[in-house]
């Protein structure tokens, strides 16, 4: 493989190109008109504009991406996450064009892309499943019987759902039928597939997922787990590796089950098997994500293995270079997803310009991002600004380092989840390891958020000065602040 096209944008496009470059592979970026000056475009050796900003006219145009790849003599396409990464038709079309798709086969994607067929495949390999209905719901009576047996609350889930969407908690029997109907029509409009099913709603659940890696020669290994239990809207915000609650025995057991799930769909490449774990440490298979995961860096930090390089090697047909027993697990890593969101206001998305953008540095700190100072948050795509990852000899060092790095991170102009990250790191429940996916609901008090940046006090003083200035300006003829040299607070907002 001499030239790779990255069919994605932002931090993940950059992250993939960096590994390619280290392997001596040339890179091609694709971009929408909104991303013309984006870092991933500048970093690549070549770049192709796909079209207008909306994804369906740019990053989802598989046909254009493949045509450009052919024109430029590309021999591999990496899809990143989101966009076309889990689209079996795209993977097939890439291969048919004579280009390697850096990911699993279309067949594996189809099996695992649908939560019901994923469960069916896993069942044949004796993987523990969350109690619930087996196929898509057809008969309300049958659904009711299953729910009575497993007990309320239950979760109605869209088989084609993803990104935390397409799930409804049903607390009481009398709401079940109505909720199922709503879930079906919602799934139809959101995913073009109305298949829904019921799962027991696991109480006090932890989200624990296992990274797997498989070559084309029948070797499969796992790279241990990531604990992604700190979530909002069923979406992850803080992840860590290893989990604070797994014993070595349980780690080995879950790892083996994850490898079995991979085998159940003849998986090739890097993938993630997600489990939900109850308070008694019973774990159940939820789904498999057939791509590189957002939070893969924490695994890289504790194993020392570059997952993107491994994906490329597997796609080139190489055998895995290590056996299960040779995979190190050292230290501890934590990731905070830095979203343009306001945790004070129920994690409402924020937009704006990154007026000030200064990354933290130092030992054990990794920032994966795709922005530079002065850039606007695009409205068309995911609101994630960056992933802040810290590594430490142990969990406490990684945690303390995260607090330090989050405070060193200076982002002005857009409200971010950095302050929430610090809140989590300092919370006794997180420190003790005794928390679950209801962390936000059970422990988060927006009123006690303190801004992440150490500069805050200085900012607050500036804000006061600015407001005074502004008030004075109102009583005078012309406002004082010139647009070319704005007062620092003209462009600032509190976090
Ligand atoms: P991960 O599963 O890698 O931890 P997310 O669940 O946040 O991360 O999903 C990764 C990306 O894929 C995000 O950009 C998310 O919006 C997108 N995504 C995943 N599944 C879907 C889906 N079914 N529909 C739309 N977007 C999705
Ligand atoms: P998605 O495809 O959107 O990622 P998942 O099945 O992975 O869907 O579930 C997303 C999140 O929803 C999980 O991380 C967990 O927090 C919650 N969840 C899913 N299934 C259950 C369940 N049966 N009981 C409790 N929580 C669940
Ligand atoms: Mg999931």
Image: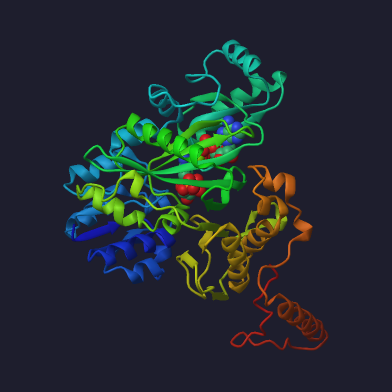
Q: Quadrant of residue 19?
A: bottom left
Residue 127 shows up from this direction: yes
Residue 328: where, in percent of width, then height? 40, 53
Q: Residue at x 28, y 38 (%)?
A: 105
Task: Specify whether 253 is left or right of 336.
Answer: left
Whether residue 171 sits left or right of residue 330 in the image: it is right
The N terminus, quarter of image: bottom left
Residue 351 seen: no
Q: How many marks?
A: 0
Quarter occupied by residue 469: bottom right
- Which of the pair 214/37 is nearer the observer? 214
Q: Quadrant of residue 214?
A: top left
Q: How is the image coloured?
A: rainbow
- Image location (x, y in percent) of residue 165: 55, 39
Q: Position of residue 34 (x, y in %)?
A: 43, 64
Judged left or right of residue 443, residue 61 is left
Quadrant the C terminus occupies: bottom right
Coordinates of residue 278 in the picture (x, y in percent): 61, 33
Vertical placement of residue 66 versus 142, above or below: below
In the displayed structure, 275 sits above or below 181; it is below
Q: Is residue 308 left or right of residue 347?
A: left
């Amino acid at each position: 493989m001499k030239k790779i096209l990255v069919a994605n944008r932002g931090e993940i496009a950059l992250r993939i190109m960096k590994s390619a470059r280290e392997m001596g592979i040339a890179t091609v970026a694709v971009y929408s008109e909104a991303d013309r000056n984006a870092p991933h475009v500048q970093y690549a050796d070549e770049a192709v504009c796909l079209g207008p900003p909306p994804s369906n006219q740019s990053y989802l145009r598989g046909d254009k991406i493949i045509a450009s790849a052919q024109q430029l003599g590309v021999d591999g396409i990496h899809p990143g996450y989101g966009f076309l990464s889990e689209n079996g038709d795209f993977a097939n079309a890439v291969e048919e064009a004579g280009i390697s798709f850096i990911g699993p086969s279309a067949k594996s994607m189809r099996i695992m892309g649908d939560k019901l067929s994923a469960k069916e495949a896993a069942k044949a390999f004796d993987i523990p499943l969350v109690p619930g209905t087996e196929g898509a719901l057809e008969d309300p009576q049958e659904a009711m019987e299953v729910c009575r047996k497993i007990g309320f609350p239950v979760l109605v889930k869209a088989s084609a759902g993803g990104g935390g969407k397409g799930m409804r908690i049903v607390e009481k029997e009398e709401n079940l039928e109505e909720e199922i109907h709503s879930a079906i029509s919602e799934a139809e409009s959101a995913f073009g597939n109305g298949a829904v099913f019921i799962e027991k709603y696991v109480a006090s659940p932890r989200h624990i997922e296992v990274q797997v890696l498989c070559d084309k020669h029948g070797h499969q290994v796992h790279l241990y787990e990531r604990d992604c239990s700190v979530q909002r809207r069923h979406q992850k915000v803080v992840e860590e590796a290893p989990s604070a609650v797994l014993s070595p025995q349980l780690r080995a057991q879950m790892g083996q089950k994850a490898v079995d799930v991979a085998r159940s769909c003849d998986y090739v490449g890097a993938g993630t098997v997600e489990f939900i774990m109850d308070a008694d440490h019973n774990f159940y298979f939820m789904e498999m994500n057939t791509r590189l995961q957002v939070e893969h860096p924490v695994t890289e930090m504790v194993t020392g293995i570059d997952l993107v390089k491994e994906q490329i090697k597997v796609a080139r047909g190489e055998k895995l270079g290590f056996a299960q027993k040779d995979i190190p697990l050292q230290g501890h890593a934590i990731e905070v997803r830095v979203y343009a969101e306001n945790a004070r206001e129920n994690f409402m998305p924020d937009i704006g310009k990154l007026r000030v953008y200064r990354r933290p540095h130092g030992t054990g700190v990794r920032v994966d991002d795709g922005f530079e100072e002065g850039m606007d948050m695009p409205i068309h795509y995911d609101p994630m600004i960056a992933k802040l990852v810290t590594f430490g000899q142990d969990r406490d060092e990684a945690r303390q380092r995260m607090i330090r790095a989050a405070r060193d991170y200076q982002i002005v102009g857009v409200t971010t989840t950095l302050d929430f990250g610090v809140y989590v790191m300092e919370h006794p429940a997180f420190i003790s390891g005794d928390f679950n996916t209801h962390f936000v609901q059970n422990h988060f008090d927006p009123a006690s958020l303190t801004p992440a940046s150490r500069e805050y006090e200085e900012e607050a003083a500036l804000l006061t000065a600015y407001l005074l200035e502004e008030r004075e300006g109102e009583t005078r003829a012309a406002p004082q602040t010139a647009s070319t040299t704005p007062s620092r607070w003209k462009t600032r907002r509190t976090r």
